[in-house]
Image: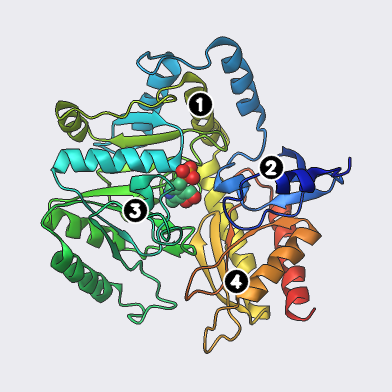
Amino acid sequence: MGTDGFWDDAERHLVRYGGAFAPVVVERAAGSFVYDSAGRAILDFTSGQMSAVLGHSHPDVVATVRESIGTLDHLFSGMLSRPVVDLARELAASLPDPLERSLLLTTGAESNEAALKMAKLATGGWEIVSFAQSWHGMTGGAASATYSAGRRGYGPPIPGNLAIPAPYPYRSVFGDDWRTELDVAWDLVDRQSAGALAACLVEPILSSGGVLELPPGYLAALRAKCDERGMLLILDEAQTGIARTGTMYAFERDGVVPDILTLSKTLGAGLPLAAVVTSADIEQRCHERGFLFFTTHVSDPLPAAVGLTVLDVVRREGLVSRAAELGGRLRTGLTELASRHDCIGEVRGRGLLQGIELVTDRTTKDPADDLGRAVTTECLDLGLHMNVVQLPGMGGVFRIAPPLTVSDAEVGLGLEILDQALTKAVAP
Ligand SMILES: Cc1ncc(COP(=O)(O)O)c(C=O)c1O
């Protein structure tokens, strides 16, 4: 199958909503691969948009969608169905106390929007603290708490949003001393606050921000900063939730339980499903104060049924330990590549969410933006899709997040292609 007038039509009729489109026409996707119009297999190391944790078209998900679309698809938003209540119960069972009440939505931005509204209602405050390298979504509240991109040209963001630096020892002037960095950051928050701090919204590993992992102890220290100020801690586990980092939820490593947890991308494994999970106490307070989040697809049965299937597959296929084990293998492979390729400044991440930061020089750490683009192109030519994020002051950072169902051989293939692409891009 050729590409016919595809690109002409795309150029003529599509709104461009981000960077350039990948120069492939994808005809189908299965397992860890997508296939282009020439029938070429491309290893999908971004799991679609960081979501397809079970690979593409997992047979159990296909069966669930087939069944659900034929029997129970979409309902009036005030009607409940079994998949919704079952998924809320299963989420509660997978989480520590007191996280037991869920609101089932569609996208990550929407889940953060709802979480922020709940935090404002529950605390009576309206100021929101998040990381300067954050990505929480494109809708008003979520975008106002997003600092890694997309702030210019849209008029005033929602007032009361404050940024603190995410820990980034590789480039921070504070180096490894994240405790001092955190104290300085919160001193600035306190000076800027109008006395209405409501919540701190953060990712346990900032993915779009360049795969920045919170060091052990950081989340507990952040929790303490919130508690001291009567703020809620909202964790956005859009990318880290549902086994990807080698624990069911990334926060488990830290022994810190958030007041509100948002899940999205990985929960639907590629289908549009999101959840906000909180305590009975916070839910009760919000309800009493008139919490409203009545959307077209809230509590829809089809995506909820998919979420149940995702949780079931993760359990049955032992994907939590698989992510830890394969993540270790991937990390070893990337570290080995770093030993041979000087352009790799740092390897970081956890489980099957890894990042490599490219630099032109390891001593000066100068960002290697052009090289990032060249490696992306070489990888795609060789049959590997990876995503490079380029943020101000940072080298190109590759985000590597294969499906949790990826095989050992596929991880090996990805590393081999990356090795070749790095070699070719450095010395074309
Ligand atoms: C951590 C995080 N939160 C929220 C979002 C927004 O999710 P969505 O694009 O589904 O609205 C993203 C998307 O990349 C994300 O990475």
Residue drawn at (33%, 30%), measured in percent from left and top?
102
Q: Position of residue 26 (x, y in %)?
A: 75, 43
Which numbered disc, 2 or 4, marks the residue that appears first in the sequence? 2
The local crowd at label 4, few if under 14, some if 14 to 19, many if 20 or more residues have their Cα within 10 Å, is: some
How far apart marks 3 and 4 lie (CA) works out to 36 Å
Is the distance from the Cβ of mark 3 to the nearest ligand 1 atom less than 8 Å? no
How far apart marks 2 and 3 lie (CA) works out to 30 Å
Which numbered disc, 4 or 1, marks the residue that appears first in the sequence? 1
Of tags 3 and 4, the one toward the viewer is: 3
Q: Amino acid at mark 2?
A: His
Q: Amino acid at mark 3?
A: Ser
- From this viewpoint, is residue 302 visible? yes
Q: Name the residue beneath numbered marker 1.
A: 303
128 relative to 242, above or below: below
Nearer the observer, 331 or 88: 88
Q: Name the residue beneath numbered marker 4.
A: 335
The local crowd at label 3, few if under 14, some if 14 to 19, many if 20 or more residues have their Cα within 10 Å, is: many
Specify the quadrant that holds the C terminus. Answer: bottom right
Q: Position of residue 412 (x, y in %)?
A: 72, 58
Q: Amino acid at mark 1?
A: Pro
Q: Name the residue beneath numbered marker 2.
A: 13
Q: Position of residue 401 (x, y in %)?
A: 58, 53
Q: Amino acid at mark 4?
A: Thr
Q: Is residue 292 left or right of 133 when viewed as pictured?
A: left
How far apart marks 4 and 1 lie (CA) works out to 38 Å
Q: Locate residue 264: give its quadrant.
A: top left
Of tags 1 and 3, the one toward the viewer is: 3
Is the distance from the Cβ of mark 2 to the nearest ligand 1 atom less than 8 Å? no
Q: Position of residue 416 (x, y in %)?
A: 75, 64
Q: Secondary structure at mark 2?
A: helix
